[in-house]
Amino acid sequence: MTLEQIEIIFNRAWRFAFSLKKCLFLFVFLVLCGTFAVLCHTVASISGIWIKLFMYFLPGFMLSGVLLALGVFFARVYYSEMKGLVVTYRKIFISSMKLLVNVTQIALPLVMTYLVIWMIMGLFYLIREIPYVGESIGLILSFAPFILILSSLLLCLGCAFALFFVTPHIAFRNSDDDFIRSLLSSFSSNIFSNILLFLIAFSPCLVMILLLKTSGSIAQIGLIHAYSVLKSGMQWFFMMIPFCAALTPIFLFFFNFSVESYNLIRKQKKLKA
């Protein structure tokens, strides 16, 4: 795998990310996902610390399955575009229905793991409320929230990596293969290449999210705190729409590049064989 090969697949994935039809299709789903995230953010703003932490991370884990399913769909669309085939969304969607069953095999364990972390966090806050000794025990176990929040952040990173690495494997898998075993085998045999390509794909997403987050934080100064909870939620909803519009081509590039990376690594394995 050379820099020239990476440059070629990067440019091709970027060029196909700005299809108007695909952007409009993905934008609708991102707005629906964003609406759920705004609802969680609004609930978190009026909740205690335990529920607030839960609501901050919940949208990412709950929507990871939706994004993974969309990734499988757009991976098959992109493959058809690269081959110069006529792209029919309805036909691709129907043919992908059986593949989407595998999405739950990946998304459900991530969600369940987060729920376990959240319950352990709740147990910590419950212990702190024990009369007389709770505060002392909470002081000794003060490292627990740090470890649990770090675990949640690492789990979020795992969701992002799953979107990149798992998507093409589901989209182009052989139905006769043991899916989980072939997935782990493919990753373990090309760890460096997979991580490197993931970082390249994730960089535009990270930069765009940081820009949008910074812009949103500056724009809300002196506004959201002056509103009621309902009005604050409405403001976040209308701010979310341009967020989704800006992220749409970036997500399409992410899915496109995951397909390109999958094909590139498979070619490298065939050459080594």
Image (cartoon, rainbow, N blue to C red):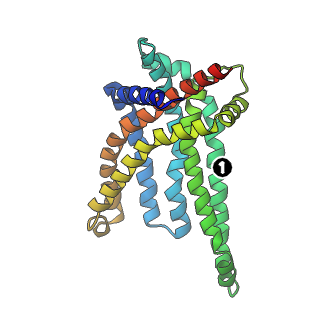
Q: Which residue appears at 41% of the width and 33% of the height?
A: 253
Image quadrant of residue 10? top left
Horizontally, residue 32 falls left or right of residue 266, namely left
Residue 200 position within the rendered picture, expressed as x and y whole percent measured from the top left = 47, 39
On screen, residue 29 above or below 266: below
Q: Which residue appears at 51% of the width and 58% of the height?
A: 55
On screen, residue 58 above or below 251: below
Mark yes or no: residue 65 visible.
no
Q: Which residue is mark 1?
A: 112
On screen, residue 99 above or below 198: above
20 or 190, nearer to the observer: 190
Q: Quadrant of the C terminus?
A: top right
229 or 162, nearer to the observer: 162
Horizontally, residue 100 falls left or right of residue 87, namely right
Q: Quadrant of the N terminus?
A: top right
Residue 35 position within the rendered picture, expressed as x and y whole percent measured from the top left = 40, 47
Residue 226 position within the rendered picture, expressed as x and y whole percent measured from the top left = 28, 69
Badge 1 element: helix
